[in-house]
Image: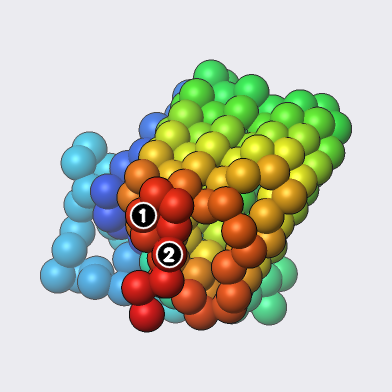
């Protein structure tokens, strides 16, 4: 039996579990640092915390971090990488991923997402439901593209940046690291590191 360990029992974890079961995994088991106070997530059992996962890696054919917060997800993934955990990426069968696109380890691509040729997606990224990543885009590690985000060709997004639901980015724009883009925003110009922007066109809030 092909079993996947998922670290992070939340709403995002539910979607990750569904993707795993739709894409060939036979069973999923959750770990969460709220255990034992939290012991289940819908139909799935939570059997331990992060330390328990590290101690039981041999029981699973793969593991993935399903935590929505970019920084925490990336930190947890780096810990698992340091102990040589068998981290996997997950792609929903109803996503479209070009054979010329590159996916980093621990990245999750959800239903309806499209990754076009020569898109490069880093480690521990989330490409959420219906997001579009056009040709030659580059996403650094721990980026989250929310549902229905659209990146035109050649967009670059820095480490741990989060683009809100329905936001759009013009071709060849560079978005820095640790940026937050508000829901429904239209990004027409480069954005510096550590910025928070929103609006049409997107403008700095902080």
Direction top: furthest residue: 94
On residue 169, the disc is: none
Q: Residue at x 27, y 48 (%)?
A: 11
Q: Quadrant of the C terminus?
A: bottom left
Q: Could you say which is closer to the camera, residue 181 or residue 170?
A: 170
Is residue 92 in sight in this rendering? no
Q: What colour scheme was applied to this rendering of the protein? A: rainbow
In terms of secondary structure, where does tag 2 sit?
Answer: strand
Q: Is residue 60 above or below residue 134?
A: below
Q: Residue at x 76, y 46 (%)?
A: 154
Q: Quadrant of the N terminus?
A: top right
Q: CA distance from mark 2 to mark 1?
A: 6 Å
**Lateral position of residue 171 relative to residue 166, left or right:** right
Q: Position of residue 78 (x, y in %)?
A: 62, 75
**Lateral position of residue 44 relative to residue 19, left or right:** left
Q: Position of residue 197 (x, y in %)?
A: 42, 65
Label 1, residues with CA under 10 Å away: few <14, some 14-19, many ≥20? some
**Lateral position of residue 46 relative to residue 77, left or right:** left
Q: Are marks 2 and 1 in contact (CB under 8 Å)?
A: yes
Residue marked by disc 1: 199
Q: Residue at x 42, y 71 (%)?
A: 204
Residue marked by disc 2: 203
């Amino acid at each position: 039996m092909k079993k996947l360990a998922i670290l992070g029992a939340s709403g995002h974890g539910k979607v990750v579990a569904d993707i795993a079961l739709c894409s060939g995994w036979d069973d999923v088991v959750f770990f969460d640092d709220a255990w034992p106070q939290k012991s289940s997530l819908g139909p799935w059992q939570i059997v331990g915390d992060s330390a328990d996962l590290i101690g039981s890696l041999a029981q699973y054919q793969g593991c993935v971090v399903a935590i929505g917060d970019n920084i925490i997800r990336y930190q947890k993934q780096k810990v698992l990488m340091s102990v040589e955990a068998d981290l996997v990426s997950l792609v929903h069968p109803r996503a479209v991923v070009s054979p010329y696109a590159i996916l980093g380890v621990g990245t999750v691509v959800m239903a309806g997402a499209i990754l076009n040729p020569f898109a490069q997606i880093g480690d521990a990224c989330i490409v959420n439901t219906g997001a579009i990543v056009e040709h030659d885009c580059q996403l650094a590690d721990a980026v989250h593209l929310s549902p229905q985000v659209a990146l035109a060709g050649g967009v670059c997004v820095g480490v741990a940046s989060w683009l809100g639901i329905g936001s759009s980015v013009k071709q060849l724009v560079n978005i820095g690291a640790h940026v937050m883009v508000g829901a429904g925003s239209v990004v027409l110009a480069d954005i510096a590191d550590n910025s928070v922007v929103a609006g049409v066109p997107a403008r700095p809030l902080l």
